[in-house]
Amino acid sequence: MKPQDHGQWKTLMRLAARSIATPLATLSDEADRFEKFSFSAAGLLLDLSKQRLDQPILESLLALAQECGFEAGRRALLDGELVNTTEKRSALHTALRAPAGARPADVTEVGQRLVDLVNAVHSGAWRGATGRVITDIVHIGIGGSHLGPELVCEALTATPASPGSTHVHFVANLDAHALARVLAEVDPERTLFVIVSKSFSTLETRVNALSARSWLLERMADPDAVSAHFVAVTSNPQAAAAFGIPESNRFELWDWVGGRFSLWSAVGLPIMFSAGIHAFTRLLAGAQAMDAHFADAALEENLPLLMALTGIWNYNFLGVTNHAILPYCERLRLLPDYLQQLMMESNGKSVHLDGSTVSIHTMPIVWGGTGTNGQHAFHQLLHQGTRAFTADFILCAADEHQLSDHHRWLLANALGQSQAMMSGEAHADPHRAVAGNHATTTLVLPDLEPESIGALLALYEHTVFCQGLLWNINSFDQWGVELGKRLAEPIFKQLGGSSALTQDMPTRGLINYLRRFDE
Ligand code: F6P
């Protein structure tokens, strides 16, 4: 059924017409607004009091969730039903972080092998081909096989790493400068490459891994050096074997783990290397706490559902076309990149589950950057531009460094920005007036401990799932990315040769232009 065919959709259309006519700032005068519209779970605070919500709107949104089959959909996800209908797969990322006793046996087994590997590297028991201890890990992977691990590694840098922890580098981009920059920093005799690719066929990862292998072999006399310097995380063991990675160095991924939901699996190996095994375990525990809340909390207190409904309210009823992720936290610098994939690759869809065309909007453009840097870049447009937007402010209540003034200023700026976006300011000079009337959400983490990061990421994962459920789309496939990949294949050959071009005229023009530079 199309979402707009539900009775509550029509009710919400009426409520939206009324709501739009009321300046957001007038809502902010309600004395108990913060108490009524802020919620907490797993240590996180979700403040929706700066959103264009009131009790009838919230009740109608919750009723819409029920009409859309939220409870049955949530059960289907958590019970491992084939919610990824086009690929006939379940999406059981929650099983990766289930309490130890409830975890599938193969997850536990791979988890133990990862612990053994990390311990062997950290203790010096694992040696490179020339007998040197490993000091550097080079993680090669892209998309879901990169964004989550790098985000978490950066977020946990202030967490004391286990003794002997290794320096982790990431290579994702096909551009050879990404690989060259990392290779210039590492010693082949002391480097372990971790090739992370669920399919083991992704172009970027394949090309980077092949170049890394050539680089290593050119510098080592031993043609068998690959087995001491490469491990793989994949669900395609045959391809990893063909690359030269022995079974003992391969770590399994299952088809029921979607790429962008995979950081909790062996894909998170660099997190173990840099922050330590204990930190990774705590990360899983934080995500599990959010899973338990998502599974059991009543709808009206359920953070992922509330966040999802707030998004739908903004995107489908209030006309918002873009959503900014604004972490006021340097260590969450990569959160916008990670959430772009999670949200846009999951819910950037235009057909319903039954293949019929969607006739409402689904996911808007997601973008963002850290505060306060963004205040000196794009916030001018947010305050005085003509576009409607919403934003998530992500704050950390306590920080670990000793420079408390920095942290207080950081928090003050975040609150000042969302206040300005909500209320604006009248001014006699129109150039100085700020209209306000922009709804924002504030998420507060207690700290940047692994549990808090785990809970935050699981909150966003479930939010994405809830929105997909309400839009009646498949959040777990990504067919749209295939066409461009396929079209690049012949162009690769044509750029390096003189074969006839069959593309459209503008593309032919560009190929001909670029051919002149290809030697
Ligand atoms: O091209 C999109 C995509 O398939 C993502 O969904 C995925 O996270 C990424 O490529 C990497 O895929 P793989 O882990 O198979 O290399």
Image (cartoon, rainbow, N blue to C red):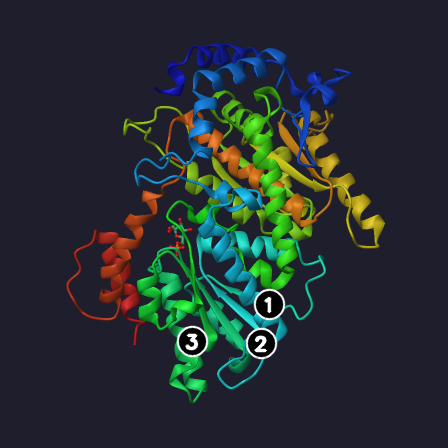
Which residue does the numbered mark 1 point to in the structure image? Answer: 119
Question: For the view shown, which residue lies furthest in the bottom direction?
Answer: 221
Residue in view at x 20 percent, y 54 percent? 503
Q: Which amino acid does label 1 sit on?
A: Asn
Query: Within 10 Å of the Cα at label 2, are there few (<14), some (14-19), or many (20+) other Cα atoms?
Result: some
First reached walking from the N terminus: tag 1 or tag 2: 1
Which residue does the numbered mark 2 point to in the structure image? Answer: 125
Q: What residue type is labelled 3?
A: Ser
Disc 3 versus disc 1: nearer the observer: 1
Q: What residue type is labelled 2?
A: Ala
The disc placed on residue 227 is: 3
Please indicate, yes or no, whether residue 378 appears anywhere in the rendered image: no
As drawn, 38 above or below 168? above
**Residue 49 at x, y percent in the picture:** 68, 24
**Residue 478 at x, y percent in the picture:** 36, 43
Asked whether 400 or 164 is in front, the reply is 164
